[in-house]
Image (cartoon, coloured by chain):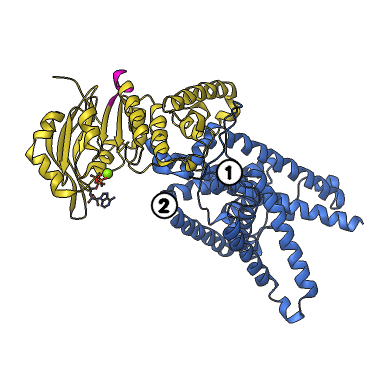
Chain colours: A yellow, B blue
């Protein structure tokens, strides 16, 4: 069996009486682009929040590379190679696009009060290195020309790309993308997919929440479906297309584009 | 003539001390987005501790350590930092409006403690018995005041340079990210609690420095010096000058202190005698209106924060409407 990078056992989380994530057990295969689908309110984003430590589970465990990371804070998990983007982009609005990206590397010398005064040379050298890398990453996600713009003033689709760029600065081994193509124009979406597949070839594992079935069927394997907080399907995209339960879950819930 | 110059030196000294305080608040609010509603507690901790540590023995309250002045001043800064650290540990998990209310409460508690605990700091009568440093050598006159102003000015410039370098560094980037979106910053590996605490304590140490200088200037501090009015004034200075911009903070301090002083003078001169009792309240209303007006028409302040851009000489694209 292929190696597992991330796994959960019996993961649950309620909001009041609502079981948003209900006893989810799953394995994410190393090197895969796993698609996570399900109707609105199925608990997909909540599951991401549980995996990244943004929310604490009521019960259940999460393992990353075999290590129990249940309940660890998001900052610790980012440092261990787990990156994520948000369904609604969260740019640092009154900072330039470049600064948004340069922020991300962990453990910078200049990140302490003492750094800028007692470790100036090291800080300068590191800043130069980080800036070069950031400009490279911005070019990679096609935002190079916007480096000096306030991040709050770029388009919604560009913000999605910016979030990806920020995450890439940490060289994560696993990236969770929450609806990366939503609100992004088709040309940009193609670009985005190209980038994701390129990174995937270099070894990065992806889990992608997406409503666009065409996107999921063409680019994700395996596919996992949630409905009302539970896993209702796990398999290849071909199997997904033929699965009556899955069609039900979708037909039952939405007229999503 | 010497009278006017003497007055100007007095004015500039006070304004410079307040400017240092505004710089401290700017680190907290302008850069990090921490709503400190109890500025005066940290300012006051600095003033009280400096005078207690550096003063001569007094009957009835703590003090008389007669420390070498720079050490007393450092002690004042440390006291403000320690207070901020404790308050920070207890409250920094709170979000903006709650943090404002909690810190405001701390400041009111501080004032009440100083007013009532006579054994600690003289109660309502305040801390006396502090000798201004080098007074014996220089006397009490104009020369002393001029030199004291020079020292305050040097400290103001040093504080400004310190903060400019700090906020231009990756640390400053970290503060801004916390201000803009804490959750996103945390998802990128940053520890918001630690960063907020560091910024809160550092800003409060600067507030304590300003307080220590203020106490030194008057060689006296009492509960009257730590009323919420001062918190209010320092906030007005920052908002009018431009939160997030250190030059704006200094500019705002001089502008608002000038307006405050001038309005006080004008009211005492031209207002009917019966109304003069209310000079303070009228000034309060004026400054409140200035804050409200500023927030409505120019919330970024007179000298707004500047965006940090890369220095690689590429012309940014013309901004298009988004
Ligand atoms: N912080 C919260 N407090 C209370 N309820 C919440 C919270 N977050 C999510 N929920 C609820 O949990 C359920 C699952 O929400 P979630 O955002 O995970 O769905 P989703 O699958 O991502 O949906 P969508 O496709 O619309 O993004 C929803 O009913 C939602 O209202
Ligand atoms: Mg969602």
Residue picked out by circle 1: B78
Task: Point out the residue furthest to the bottom here.
Answer: B274
Q: Earlier in the sequence, mark 1 or mark 2?
A: 1
Residue A153 drawn in magenta = no
Residue A252 image position (x, y, % from top left)? 13, 49
- Name the quadrant containing residue A47: top left
Is B204 or B161 nearer to us in this picture? B161
The answer to whether residue A203 is magenta is yes
Q: What residue do we see at 9% from left, 34% from top? A: A242
Nearer-the-camera pick, B96 or B137: B96
Tag in front: 1 or 2:
2
In the picture shown, does residue A191 fall above or below A18? Answer: above
> Percent from the top left, x then y, of residue B183?
39, 42
Chain where mark 2 sits: B
Residue B94: mark in rendering: 2
SS at circle 1 = helix
Disc 2 within 8 angstroms of ligand 1 (CB): no
Q: Quadrant of the C terminus of chain A?
A: top left
Q: Which residues are magenta?
A: A199-205
Task: Judge whether B237 appears above or below B152 on screen.
Answer: below
Please give the name of the residue rendered at 81% of the width and 52% of the height, measured from the top-left corner: B9
Quadrant in which the N terminus of chain A appears: top left
């Amino acid at each position: 069996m292929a190696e597992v990078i991330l796994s959960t056992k019996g993961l649950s989380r309620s909001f009041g009486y609502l079981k948003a994530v209900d006893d989810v057990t799953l394995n994410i295969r190393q090197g895969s682009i796993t698609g996570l689908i399900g109707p609105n309110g199925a608990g997909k984003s909540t599951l991401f929040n549980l995996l990244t430590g943004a929310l604490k589970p009521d019960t259940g465990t999460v393992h990353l590379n075999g290590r129990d990371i249940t309940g660890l804070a998001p900052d610790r998990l980012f440092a261990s190679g787990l990156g994520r983007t948000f369904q609604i982009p969260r740019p640092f609005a009154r900072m330039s696009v470049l600064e948004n990206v340069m922020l991300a590397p962990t453990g910078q010398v200049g990140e302490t009060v003492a750094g800028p005064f007692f470790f100036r040379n090291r800080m300068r050298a590191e800043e130069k290195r980080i800036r070069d890398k950031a400009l490279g990453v911005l070019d990679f996600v096609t935002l190079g020309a916007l480096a000096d713009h306030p991040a709050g003033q770029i388009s919604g689709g560009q913000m999605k790309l910016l979030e990806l760029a920020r995450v890439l600065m940490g060289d994560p081994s696993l990236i969770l993308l929450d609806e990366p193509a939503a609100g992004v124009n088709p040309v940009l979406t193609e670009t985005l997919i190209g980038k994701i597949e390129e990174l995937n070839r270099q070894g990065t594992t992806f889990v992608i929440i997406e409503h666009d079935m065409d996107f999921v069927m063409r680019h994700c394997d395996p596919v996992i479906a949630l409905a009302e907080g539970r896993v209702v399907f796990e398999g290849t995209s071909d199997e997904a297309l033929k699965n009556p339960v899955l069609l039900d879950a979708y037909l039952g819930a939405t007229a999503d584009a | 003539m010497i009278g006017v110059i003497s007055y100007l030196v007095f004015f500039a000294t006070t304004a410079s001390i307040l400017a240092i305080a505004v710089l401290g608040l700017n680190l907290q609010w302008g850069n990090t987005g921490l709503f400190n509603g109890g500025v005066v507690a940290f300012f006051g901790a600095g003033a009280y501790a400096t005078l207690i540590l550096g003063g001569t023995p007094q009957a009835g309250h703590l003090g008389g350590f007669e420390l070498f002045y720079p050490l007393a001043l450092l002690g004042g800064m440390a006291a403000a930092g320690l207070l901020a650290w404790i308050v920070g540990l207890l409250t920094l998990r709170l979000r903006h409006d709650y943090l404002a209310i909690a810190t405001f409460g701390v400041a009111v508690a501080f004032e009440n403690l100083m007013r009532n605990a006579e054994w600690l700091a003289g109660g309502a009568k305040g801390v006396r018995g502090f000798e201004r440093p080098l007074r014996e050598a220089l006397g009490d006159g104009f020369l002393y005041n001029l030199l004291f102003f020079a020292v305050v000015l040097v400290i103001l410039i040093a504080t400004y340079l310190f903060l400019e370098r700090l906020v231009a560094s990756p640390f400053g980037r970290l503060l801004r990210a916390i201000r803009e979106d804490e959750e996103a910053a945390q998802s990128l590996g940053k520890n918001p609690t630690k960063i907020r605490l560091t910024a809160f304590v550092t800003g409060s140490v600067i507030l304590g420095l300003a307080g220590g200088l203020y106490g030194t200037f008057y060689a006296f501090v009492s509960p009257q010096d730590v009323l919420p009015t001062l918190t209010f004034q320092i906030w007005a200075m920052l908002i009018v000058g431009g939160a997030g911009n250190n030059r704006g903070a200094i500019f705002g301090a001089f502008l608002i202190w000038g307006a405050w002083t001038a309005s006080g003078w004008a009211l005492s001169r031209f207002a009917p005698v019966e109304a003069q009792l209310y000079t303070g309240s009228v000034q309060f209303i004026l400054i409140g209106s200035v804050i409200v007006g500023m927030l409505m028409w120019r919330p970024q302040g007179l000298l707004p924060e500047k965006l940090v851009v890369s220095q690689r000489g590429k012309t940014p694209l013309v901004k298009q409407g988004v």
